[in-house]
Image: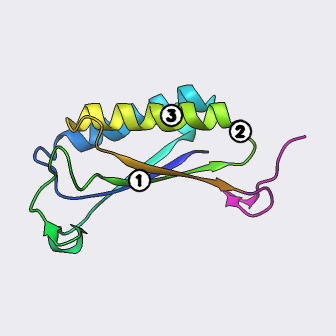
């Protein structure tokens, strides 16, 4: 159930966003060990005046600053090695597909057993 949430400045080529999200979802699923249909990815565009690095703001996504800010929410229980693999797959795929090599920020968060509702019930670890 990985969920990738991306907040980013307007992209130079906004037509790349949809395919970038799809390819990143597939890359996450391969590293996480689930079906691509179990990975959700969303995109929220930030207004340029609402994203600064110190005093610096820009109109569109630059190549080296103001990275898209991403959160990856996954169910608990993955090893540190799998978490690292998922983060690398997501960052590499998203940055490549958007054409902004190595300019992504992603933080990994765990959803705890018994603290998530998906569909019609509470999700718990399967032991």
- Which of marks 2 and 3 precedes in the sequence? 3
Residue in the image at 79% along x and 55% along y = 113
Q: Farthest residue in the top direction?
A: 30
Which one is nearer the viewer's eye here, 42 or 76? 76
Pinpoint residue 75: horizontal percent, then vertical percent.
68, 48
Q: Quadrant of the N terminus?
A: top right
* Residue span colored magenta: 112-127
Residue in the image at 63% along x and 32% along y = 82
Residue in the image at 81% along x and 52% along y = 124
Pinpoint residue 6: horizontal percent, then vertical percent.
37, 54
Left or right: residue 11 versus residue 97 is left
Which one is nearer the viewer's eye here, 121 or 33? 33
Q: Nearer the viewer, mark 3 or mark 1?
A: 1
| Label number found at residue 28 | 3
Q: List the residue tagged with mark 1.
A: 70
For the residues labelled 3 and 1, the Cα–Cα distance comes to: 13 Å
Q: Give the SS element for disc 3.
A: helix
| Label number found at residue 78 | 2
Which one is nearer the viewer's eye here, 70 or 30? 70
- Which of marks 1 and 3 precedes in the sequence? 3
């Amino acid at each position: 159930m990985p969920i990738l949430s991306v907040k980013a400045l307007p992209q130079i080529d906004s037509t790349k966003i949809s395919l970038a999200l799809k390819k990143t979802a597939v890359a996450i699923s391969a590293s996480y060990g689930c079906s691509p249909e179990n990975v959700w990815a969303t995109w929220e565009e930030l207004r340029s005046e609402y994203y600064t690095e110190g005093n610096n703001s820009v109109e569109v996504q630059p190549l080296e600053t103001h990275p898209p800010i991403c959160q990856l929410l996954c169910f608990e229980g993955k090893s540190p090695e799998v978490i690292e693999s998922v983060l690398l797959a997501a960052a590499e795929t998203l940055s490549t597909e958007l054409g902004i090599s190595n300019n992504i920020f992603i933080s990994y968060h765990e959803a705890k057993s018994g603290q998530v509702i998906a569909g019609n019930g509470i999700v718990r670890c399967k032991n």
